């Protein structure tokens, strides 16, 4: 039986006039990796900061392990390991000292803090940098140190706001590997936001796509792909000036995006007539993916706003 670790109902955060999070409902099940996707300003970080008790809710209900985040902040904070979008390491301290100081917030006894710190530096591949100053670390190393720090008090829940943004593909893969291990071996429940569709597809069992503080869609990556776009995509690059074909193609949907045309269909044979139309262009026939879903959802929302004259 699945058990809810995080439950949000009508969760809302208002900054002045801005409804950063606008009455969203979702739940996160024990042991799953749950993704938050959405364009810049969608409300992902705000949602995560409310879960981690870094900012109060304006209204709605939010509980973590059955504890109301408004009433049981201290308790909730002790259950969650947090990696915020911006690194906030202490630049005056070295790597190991950063961990030791943070361990004090959780009142870990010194010897325990010392052993755990070393273990976590090994886990994140930073043991050879234990004495390095934080500002001597590369971006990827800082991110790994942030993750190590979030794990010090052995939380059962991790809230990771864009854990791998700006990292090279190899470091990103290493972080994915570590997150998989935490989930598989430690049963850790993970919430993460990302702009990398590959990351969401690989790691997340379920995800929500947000825009303008609302949830546009939710489900597993596969469900989202299958329910939002058809299985196959024909992608045509560099076709400014060429008309998008919208009429007379049964079972095909089309969209124009950044100088490319995209056609979706359940069967590749339905896309065959288009091959002729685009002779000489760069064509790619491929399975549909989460990026297609994302762009489709977010683009259509913006188009809707324009039609309604919103800003
Ligand atoms: N402290 C704040 N004060 C005022 N407005 C804020 C504050 N934090 C966020 N906002 C606004 O709330 C909205 C949602 O911001 P949020 O940081 O949650 O988006 P996001 O989905 O994390 O975006 P990104 O992908 O760029 O990180 C934005 O319009 C932002 O300007
Ligand atoms: Mg953010």
Image (spheres, grey):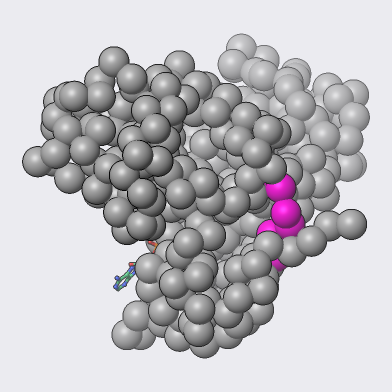
- Identify the residue at image location x=58%, y=85%: 60
Question: What is the number of callouts on the image?
Answer: 0
Q: Observer-nearest residue: 61 or 281?
A: 61
Indicate the quadrant containing the C terminus: top left, top right, bottom left or bottom right: bottom left
Q: Observer-nearest residue: 185 or 287?
A: 185
Above or below residue 211? Residue 110 is above
Report x, y in % for residue 97. Answer: 21, 38
The answer to whether residue 247 is seen in the rendering is: no
Left or right? Give the position of 65 relative to 12. Answer: right
Above or below residue 44? Residue 270 is above
Left or right? Give the position of 8 relative to 259. Answer: right
Residue that sits furthest to the left in the current view: 92
Report x, y in % for residue 102. Answer: 30, 50
292 is within the stretch colored magenta: no
The answer to whether residue 137 is seen in the rendering is: yes
Above or below residue 127? Residue 292 is below
Report x, y in % for residue 260. Answer: 55, 32
Q: Observer-nearest residue: 119 or 248?
A: 119
31 is within the stretch colored magenta: yes
- Identify the residue at image location x=59%, y=51%: 156
Q: Observer-nearest residue: 57 or 280?
A: 57
Magenta segment: 27-32
Report x, y in % for residue 1. Answer: 89, 57
- Identify the residue at image location x=48%, y=38%: 258
- Identify the residue at image location x=33%, y=35%: 114
Residue that sits furthest to the top in the current view: 280
Above or below residue 156? Residue 47 is below
Looking at the rendering, which quadrant does residue 232 occupy? top right
């Amino acid at each position: 039986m699945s058990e809810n670790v995080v439950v949000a109902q009508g969760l809302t955060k208002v900054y002045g006039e801005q409804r950063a999070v606008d009455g969203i409902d979702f739940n996160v099940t024990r042991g799953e990796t749950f993704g938050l996707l959405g364009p810049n300003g969608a409300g992902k970080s705000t949602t995560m900061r409310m879960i981690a008790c870094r900012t109060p809710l304006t209204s709605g209900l939010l509980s973590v392990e059955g504890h109301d985040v408004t009433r049981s902040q201290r308790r909730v904070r002790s259950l969650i390991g947090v990696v915020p979008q911006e690194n906030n390491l202490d630049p005056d301290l070295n790597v190991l000292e950063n961990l030791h100081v943070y361990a004090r917030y959780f009142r870990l006894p010194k010897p325990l803090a010392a052993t755990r710190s070393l273990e976590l530096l090994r886990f994140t591949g930073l043991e050879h940098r234990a004495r390095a100053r934080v500002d001597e670390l590369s971006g990827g190393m800082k991110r790994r140190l942030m993750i190590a720090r979030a794990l010090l008090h052995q939380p059962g829940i991790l809230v990771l706001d864009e854990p791998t943004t700006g990292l090279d593909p190899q470091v990103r893969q290493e972080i994915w590997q570590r997150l998989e291990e935490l989930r598989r071996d430690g049963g850790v429940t993970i919430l993460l936001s990302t702009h990398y569709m590959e990351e969401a597809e690989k790691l997340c069992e379920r995800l929500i796509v947000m825009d303008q503080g609302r949830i546009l869609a939710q489900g597993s990556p596969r469900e989202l792909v299958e329910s939002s776009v058809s299985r196959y995509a024909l992608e045509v690059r560099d076709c400014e000036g060429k008309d998008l074909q919208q009429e007379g193609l049964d079972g095909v949907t089309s969209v124009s995006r950044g100088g490319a045309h995209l056609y979706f269909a359940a069967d590749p044979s339905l896309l065959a007539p288009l091959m002729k139309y685009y002779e000489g262009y760069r064509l790619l026939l491929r399975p549909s993916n989460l990026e297609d879903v994302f762009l489709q959802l977010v683009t259509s929302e913006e188009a809707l706003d324009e039609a309604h004259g919103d800003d």
